[in-house]
């Protein structure tokens, strides 16, 4: 029997379960490109429930305990003598989330000799040290595409929020209890006719481009892999060979590239400095792709008219993180990929992976980041990145 440790975000402040706004969610059976939605043998939850928090348990407890496994769920992942560190040494499977990452460092992996599988309930496994996972013989998997559309919708929302200066207008009728229309519209623009760019044209980036097309904007993109000609023609895209060319050509830039050594701190003072004065950046990818303090300086100087995103470093950020108080921001606490709709899919995908793992069946290839073999399949140690 195995021990499974799930590190999930804390319950709602008002208690669990919350009062749901809707009675259910639409059923999604497949994604663009033909990939099917997760297909576990069964689920023990109602789609639309809050599953990603501690009491939600990703709907896994009954399934795991009926099979005789030990299931530990916590939100305590950092600091001396955290639950994560106490439980890790005899853990076989760790489940974590990009929104509340359990950072599986080389030291933590080395301290967990039984650890054979790390599952990201969502997309984005950069909180796992992949070279150490490979050396350890682990399998690392994530629920590819489960929340890609969720993130793309959030990015479009934040683009419109910044350009229309929604946050300032909302503040006038709530916090300030006023009706100062002149103040509320003094930084409010239309996106129509603007140049809008996407850095990274994977699943999320392409979904953003498709959702922006009806707004009558000029669309630009940059990626190491150029899109097929027919897609460029369909969306009337302008391709840029690098981030500098893209950044200097657009009014709005949405970041959807993975975090790796070449993209870490990519948007520093120099790169932001080539952008048009009054440009906007939306970052729903990873916080370390931008230089934290360069963003603050650019907003303060007016080089950037606004910055929005829902990714931070570290997560959660400390109370004095400067992005909490910088001007002209529209930040959220990494919620873009954790809608109740997305939770139903990534919870089902997590169960699908666990069913395969415990039954000795191969995990579907789309989910694999590192295939460490063992119960999952081939025994090959490969390193792939799911977009």
Image (cartoon, rainbow, N blue to C red):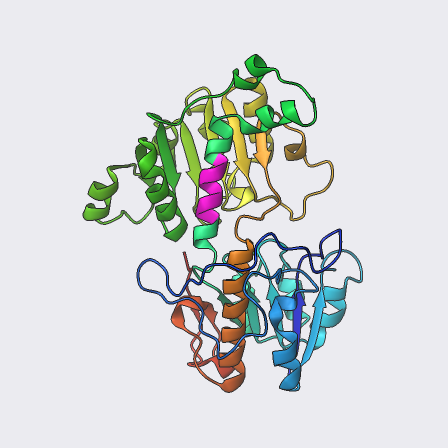
- Residue 150 visible (yes or no): yes
Q: Residue at x 55, y 43 (%)?
A: 288
Q: Is residue 217 above or below residue 336?
A: above
Pick whichever, 42 or 200, lies toward us.
Answer: 42
Measured from the top left, where is residue 274 in percent x and y? 42, 24
Which residue is outermost to the right? 81
**Which quadrant of the figure contains the N terminus?**
bottom right
Q: Residue at x 42, y 62 (%)?
A: 28
Measured from the top left, where is residue 282 in percent x and y? 49, 36
**Is 156 a magenta residue?**
yes
Q: Residue at x 35, y 47 (%)?
A: 206
Q: Is residue 187 left or right of residue 34?
A: right
Measured from the top left, where is residue 272 in percent x and y? 47, 28
**Which quadrant of the figure contains the C terminus?**
bottom left
Segment tinted magenta in the rendering: 151-158
Q: Is residue 194 above or below residue 230?
A: above
Which residue is outermost to the front? 23
Looking at the rendering, which quadrant does residue 200 occupy? top left
Secondary structure character of the magenta stretch overall: helix
Pick whichever, 316 or 57, lies toward us.
Answer: 57
């Amino acid at each position: 029997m195995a021990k499974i440790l799930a590190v999930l975000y804390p319950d709602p402040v008002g208690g669990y379960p919350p009062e749901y706004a809707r009675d259910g969610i639409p059923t999604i059976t497949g994604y663009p490109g033909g990939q099917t939605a997760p297909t576990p043998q069964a689920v023990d939850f109602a789609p639309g429930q809050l599953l990603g928090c501690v009491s939600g348990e990703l709907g896994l407890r009954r399934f795991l305990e009926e099979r005789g496994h030990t299931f530990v769920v916590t939100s305590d992942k950092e600091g001396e003598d955290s639950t994560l560190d106490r439980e890790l040494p005899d853990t076989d499977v760790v489940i974590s989330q990009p929104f509340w990452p359990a950072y599986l460092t080389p030291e933590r992996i080395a301290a967990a000799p039984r650890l054979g599988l790390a599952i990201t309930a969502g997309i984005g496994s950069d909180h796992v040290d992949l070279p150490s996972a490979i050396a350890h013989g682990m399998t690392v998997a994530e629920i590819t595409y489960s929340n890609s559309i969720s993130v793309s919708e959030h990015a479009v929302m934040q683009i419109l929020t910044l350009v229309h200066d929604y946050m300032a207008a909302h503040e006038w009728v709530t916090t300030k209890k006023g009706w100062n229309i002149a103040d509320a519209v003094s930084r409010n623009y239309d996106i129509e006719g603007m140049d809008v760019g996407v850095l990274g044209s994977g699943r999320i980036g392409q979904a953003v481009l498709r959702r922006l097309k009806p707004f009558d904007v000029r669309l630009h993109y940059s990626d190491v892999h150029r899109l097929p000609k027919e897609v460029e023609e369909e969306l009337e895209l302008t391709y840029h060979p690098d981030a500098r060319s893209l950044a200097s050509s657009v009014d709005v830039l949405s970041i959807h590239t993975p975090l790796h050594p070449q993209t870490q701190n990519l948007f520093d003072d120099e790169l932001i400095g080539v952008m048009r004065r009054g440009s906007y950046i939306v970052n729903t990818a990873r916080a370390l792709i931008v230089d934290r303090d360069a963003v603050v300086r650019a907003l303060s100087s007016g080089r950037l008219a606004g910055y929005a995103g829902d990714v931070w470093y570290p997560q959660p950020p400390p109370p004095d993180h400067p992005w909490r108080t910088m001007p002209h921001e529209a930040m959220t606490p990494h919620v873009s990929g954790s809608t109740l709709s997305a939770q139903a899919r990534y919870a089902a995908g997590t169960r699908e992976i666990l069913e395969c793992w415990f039954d000795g069946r191969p995990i579907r290839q789309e989910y694999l980041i590192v295939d460490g073999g063992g119960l999952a399949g081939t025994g090959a140690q490969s390193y792939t990145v799911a977009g």
